[in-house]
Amino acid sequence: MNQVKIQIPSIIENIRIVESFIDNSREKFQIEDDIYGNIMVAVTESVNNAIRHGNKFDKDKNVYLSLFVEPNQLRFEIEDEGNGFDPESLTDPTAPENLENPGGRGIFLMRNLCDDVSFSNDGRTVSLTFNIENAGTAN
């Protein structure tokens, strides 16, 4: 298994670093175009949530992003230094009473773009799994 990690301060502009991390990983591990878009949206949304909701824009707190590459799977882990949350307590953004709300769709989006989404560490860590065919190894 290959593993790559980065750590960024909780500044929203650092999403660009995450995008570069994903682009570099795409090249290094030959990630297919058909899931690249899903990965980019899901991972950047998760990091955005970690900065915004987890660490509450505190630049002294970090977000940790790890990529684990296995033969048939890519798994991204995003961890913040916030207080955590209960992912089961989120409202359904597709419910009629929530359709007009401007937020609340990030985790819904992640769950629809990834093959598996799981939370641990009291909601401070999210794992986004993408099933693939024969992930490449580092060149």
Image: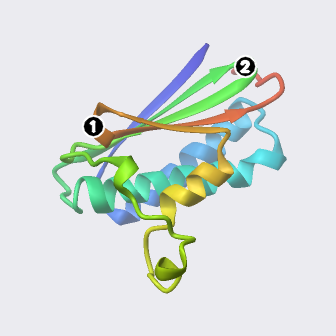
- The location of residue 127, given as percent across then percent down, is 49, 35
Dot 2 or dot 1: first in sequence order is 1
Element under label 2? loop
**Which residue is painted at 35% across and 54% down in the image?**
89
- Residue to which mark 2 is pinned: 137
**Which residue is painted at 23% across and 54% down in the image?**
55
Q: Give the residue type at disc 2.
A: Thr
- The location of residue 129, given as percent across then percent down, is 61, 34
Between the residue at mark 2 and the residue at mark 1, the CA separation in whole angstroms equals: 32 Å
Q: Give the residue type at disc 1.
A: Asp
Could you tell whether 19 is left or right of 60 in the image? right
Q: Nearer the viewer, residue 123 or 14?
A: 123
Count the numbered circles shown: 2
* Mark 2 neighbour density, 10 Å: few (under 14) some (14–19) many (20 or more): few
- Residue to which mark 1 is pinned: 122
Most distant residue in the top direction: 1
Could you tell whether 36 is left or right of 41 in the image? right
Quadrant where the image shows the N terminus: top right
